[in-house]
Image (cartoon, rainbow, N blue to C red):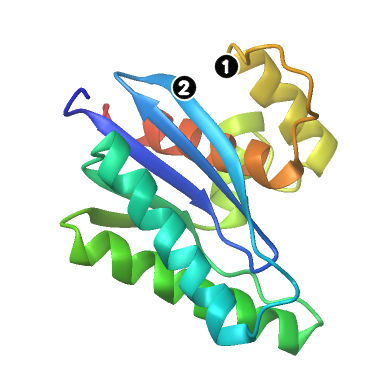
Amino acid sequence: MPSKTLLAVDPGFDRIGVAIFSKGKLAFSSCIITNRKLSHAERLGEIGLAIKKIINKWKPKLLAIEKLFFNQNITTALKVSEARGVIIYEASRLGLETVEYSPQEIKIAVTGYGKANKKQVEAMVRKLVSLPSRKKPWLDDELDAIALGITHLATKKGI
């Protein structure tokens, strides 16, 4: 795999969006979906293992991850922050540099407007990146990870 590779992650607990950009282009994207029947600790383990596999396969040099946006649901925010910790830990352990972007920074970079809604971000992602056609629908988390990758590429000169 090329050495100039970026892993962009939209953290979550049920679903984690991931996107790989290689040489400035989208090379892969998906969602890690945790098994709701497993314990909390086991689900965090699933996230760590999945991130480790992606890093080992694609060999990125950098992790771009969204900063936690605290909403009304404290339980969800805590679970997402723990998942972020697992993701950042695995990336650090495997030698990746980590950069973080706020939701507003992502919206500004992708749409030019810091209060853009999900539909506006998705529309711009589809204009900025050639998304392959496929049978399964694009999930919000996956598109958010792609937007995060676009943000890093737009704000930093490459990887």
Q: Amino acid at mark 2?
A: Leu
Sequence-first disc among 1 and 2: 2
Q: Is residue 110 left or right of residue 86?
A: right
Please provide percent x and percent y for residue 20: 42, 33
Identified at 23% across, 39% down, the residue is 59
108 or 142: nearer the viewer: 142
Please provide percent x and percent y for residue 140: 75, 43
Q: Is residue 41 above or below residue 55?
A: below
Identified at 21% across, 28% down, the residue is 4
Label 1: which secondary element: loop
Q: Is residue 84 left or right of residue 133?
A: left
Q: Is residue 66 above or below residue 138?
A: below
Find residue 129 and name its label. 1
Q: How many marks?
A: 2
Q: Is residue 95 above or below residue 133?
A: below
Identified at 41% across, 73% down, the residue is 86
Find residue 45 and name its label. none
Quadrant where the C terminus sits is: top left
Q: Is residue 130 above or below residue 61?
A: above
- Cβ atoms under marks 1 and 2 closer than 8 Å: yes
Please provide percent x and percent y for residue 79: 63, 81
Residue 100 in view (yes/no): no
| Residue designated by label 2 | 26
Q: Is residue 81 left or right of residue 96?
A: right
Please provide percent x and percent y for residue 65: 45, 55
Circle 2 crowding by C-alpha within 10 Å: few under 14, some 14–19, many from 20:
some
Q: Is residue 130 left or right of residue 45?
A: right
Circle 1 crowding by C-alpha within 10 Å: few under 14, some 14–19, many from 20:
few
